[in-house]
Structures are given as C-alpha cells and as structure tokens.
Image: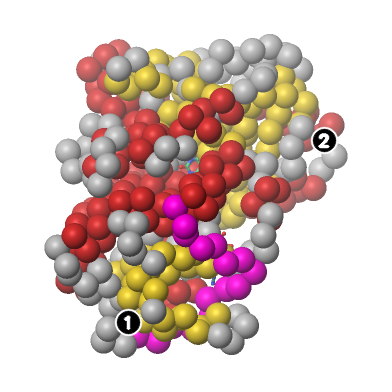
Amino acid sequence: MRDMLVVGGGYVGLSVAVAVKQAAPHLDVAVLEAAPEHVWQKDMRASAIIAAAIKMLEVFGIWDEIEPSAQPINKMIVTDSKTSDPVRPVFLTFDGEAEDGKPFAHMIPNVAMVRALRGACERLGVEIRHGLGATGLKTHDTHAEITLSDGSNIETRLVVACDGARSHLRDLAGIKTVRWDYGQSGIVTTVEHERPHNGCAEEHFLPSGPFAILPLKNNQSSLVWTETTSDANRLVRSDDLVFEEELERRFGHKLGALKVVGDKRAFPLGLTLARAFVAPRLALAGDAAHGIHPISGQGLNLGFKDVAALAETIVDADRLGLDIGSINILERYQAWRRFDTFRMGVTTDVLNRLFSNDLAPIRIARDFGLGIVDRLPGLKSYFIGQAAGTTAKDNPRLLAGQTI
Ligand SMILES: Cc1cc2nc3c(=O)[nH]c(=O)nc-3n(C[C@H](O)[C@H](O)[C@H](O)COP(=O)(O)OP(=O)(O)OC[C@H]3O[C@@H](n4cnc5c(N)ncnc54)[C@H](O)[C@@H]3O)c2cc1C
C-alpha cells in the first residue's frame, strides 16, 4: 500500500509530492497523471508567481534552475477606460518590491516550472505514472482504493486530488461545489514587441473585462485578455493580423509594433469553490478545491498555499506517528485554507463584476477608489504585501522560506 497518491500531475500535484517527500523521505509517494508524457512541454503559457510561492520553490531547491527564465515584475500600472479611448489615464501604480528589495512577483513560463518540479520528483524518488486517469474511488477505514483507467487499482492511506477545476475525484468523494460561469473567456498568448517593457505589468480595465499584459524575458509579454466567450472564440480563430489590430486598439503603441508569437487560446472563466476540502482519506488542493477568475493572477498561487499547508499538516502528523489520512488530521488543513480561499474567490468575483462594465456611476466610483489608493503609500504597501503573500500571519513554513 502507498502512503500518498497524488491524482493530477499539474503544478499543484507535483509540488505537493515534492513538499511531502522532501520532508518525509520514508513515505511512499506517487503521482498519477491522465495526460500522456511530454504533453506538458507544449504549454506555451506563463504564470505570475508571488514572492511567498517563490520562497517555497527555493526550499525545494529548484529556484536556481527556474530563475534564468523568470522575469521579475518591477512595476504595475492600472488603468480604467473604454476600448475606443485614445489615451488611457493611469489610476494606480505599484512599485514591485515586496520585502528585502525582492519583486512581489515573477512571470514564470509554465514549462520551466513543470520541468523543475518533475526533476525534483525524480531526484526524491517520487514515481510519476502517465496516461492513466483515476476513474473510481472506494474508501475503507484504513485506506482508499483508486481505480485507474486501465482497470487496475492502487491502495493508499491518503489521496490528494489535484485534478483541476473539473475534478472527477471531488465528485466521486461526493463533495459539492458553489459554481457559476462568467460568460467570459480569457484569451492567452505571447507577443513580441519593439520596445522593452522594463519589467512593467499593465492591467487595463475595459468594458468587456480586464486586459493584462505581463512582462516576459527578451522583449516578449504574456497576454491575459478577457472578452465575452463568443468574442474570445472569434478572436482566437482570427488571422494574426486581425488579432494584432484588435490588440493594438486595446493596448496602443506604447511598446512599438506587436507581433503574436505564441498559440492563441481561450479559457472559459468561472468560479468554482468546493464546499469541503477534505473527505475521509482524501484532500483537495489547487483548482480541484477552487477555480477563480484570473483578474488578479492568484489562482495557482492559492494552489501553492494549499500545497504548503497540506504538506505541513501531513508531515507534522507523520512525525507524531499519527495516521496521515485520518479525517481529524485533514480537517486541520481544511480549517487553515478555507477562509483564505473563500475570501480570494469573493474578492476576484466582486472585482470582475465591478470592473467588467461601462456604467458611468460605477466607473466614477471605482476610479475614485483607485485614485485614493494611489495617493496613500501605506495602503499601497499593504496591498503589495497581500499580493506577494509575504505578510499573512498564518503562512505555512514553506511560504516563509523554511523547511517543514
Ligand atoms: C487565462 C488564465 C490565466 C491564469 N494566470 C494565472 C497567473 O498568472 N497566476 C496564477 O497564480 N494563476 C493563474 N491562472 C490559474 C492557474 O492556471 C490554475 O490555478 C492552475 O493551473 C491550477 O493548477 P492545478 O495543478 O491545480 O490544476 P491543473 O493545472 O488543471 O492540472 C490538473 C492536472 O490533473 C490532470 N488530471 C485531470 N483529471 C485527472 C484524472 N482523473 N486522473 C489523473 N490526472 C488527472 C490533468 O491532466 C492536469 O495535468 C490562470 C488561469 C487562466 C484560465
């Protein structure tokens, strides 16, 4: 019987396997990933990863490998205007330092992050099985039994479900969700530009939703551009020239001519919050527990916070000789993570509703709010600390850069 089976070998699944195995090498930990091997190498996206999560990657011993491809975010600009406005007045600017002169976040190509996490799994002796999905779950007093898509079974003391926002294991465990769709999709692609971005990230609140242009290495930037789902699908199917023209209408020529250099993809956006994070012998982490709007680039960062809290809960219990899969132990993890997740889910939902519209009174009120924040340095550094994840009082050890 295994000690811990992680279902889903995305960023969160791989990270939880590394965190637990690094601190408790005697535990038998494996990862099950439905996609065939090497599919992860085709992911051309990048993610904004906050300072606290980077401290965890440092403890994993993989930050030195990731850093050369990571672009620090040195500054952030927020504007609020109509798509057709020729000039976008800046309402809010943030300098990107969180603490010790370190940037509050870095843009990291997903491939670099997954490659490093997989390397760590290999070094630590975590087996990754590809091309096999979990299709069944049976729970017994002492263990859980996972059925795989080839009909075989794995017995394990604990299942950690990291199988994404449409988590099948969450359904199999009978955990209900609060869920709604925004009717919006996030268009993601990479663009190359003539002028340097100087590490500046920009978020423009446009009537159809937020439009973010986030700095990457080598005069490239990553776009997360929200439109109604029908417009987003039309835009990703359009010719690159049409797409670039629409892009310039929204972003202008600040960075010179823009050229699409990556795949264009549209991700339907919704809010999914699991009503419970744990069940007997099972814990949810990452998008399986919470899928949120990318308006603040915090989805994966929330998942990394789950990783740190869950790994600390499991390792502490194991050191005391307790059963790592027992519901009493897992409830500590749930209590630790549920409020923060709920707060972030509600915050992103309210921000998206507040900014994805063109009603004049709402626009005046929100611009007034942004203007006030911009004039209060204390409030700004509070927001930066919150966004970087470094000021939370209940941070797990990994997020403070300490080993478990
Ligand atoms: C447009 C957009 C932009 C974003 N930008 C950011 C950002 O800048 N910063 C940020 O923090 N977050 C961002 N996010 C959110 C982030 O992408 C997600 O939070 C993150 O991918 C969640 O990781 P995960 O490992 O939990 O799930 P996933 O990445 O969904 O991985 C789940 C894995 O489980 C596997 N799987 C599924 N079912 C099974 C099964 N039955 N058996 C075995 N394996 C299974 C899948 O193949 C997959 O590999 C963004 C999201 C979107 C849509």
Residue 393 left/right relative to 303: left
Q: Which mark is residue 143?
A: 1
Residue 150, above or below 397: below
Query: How is the protein colored in the picture?
Result: secondary structure
Q: 278 or 77: which is nearer to us? A: 278
Q: Residues within 10 Å of mark 2 (few under 14, many from 20)?
A: some
The residue sitting at 67% across, 24% down in the picture is 220
Residue 324, above or below 353: below
Q: Is mark 1 within 8 Å of ligand 1?
A: no
Q: 291 or 57: which is nearer to us? A: 57
Type of amino acid at the residue the image marks with label 2? Asp
Residue 38, quarter of the rendered image: bottom right
The residue sitting at 53% across, 76% down in the picture is 134
Query: Disc 2 on helix, strand or loop?
Result: helix
Residue 379, quarter of the rendered image: top left
Which range is magenta? 124-139
Instruction: Select label 1 or label 2 by which is in front.
Output: 1
The residue sitting at 34% across, 64% down in the picture is 27
Is residue 153 in the magenta section?
no
Residue 348 at x, y = what percent?
39, 44
Residue 135 at x, y = what percent?
53, 80
Q: Main secondary structure of the magenta part?
A: strand
Q: CA distance from mark 1 to mark 2?
A: 52 Å
The residue sitting at 50% across, 84% down in the picture is 153
Type of amino acid at the residue the image marks with label 1? His
Residue that badge 2 annotates: 240
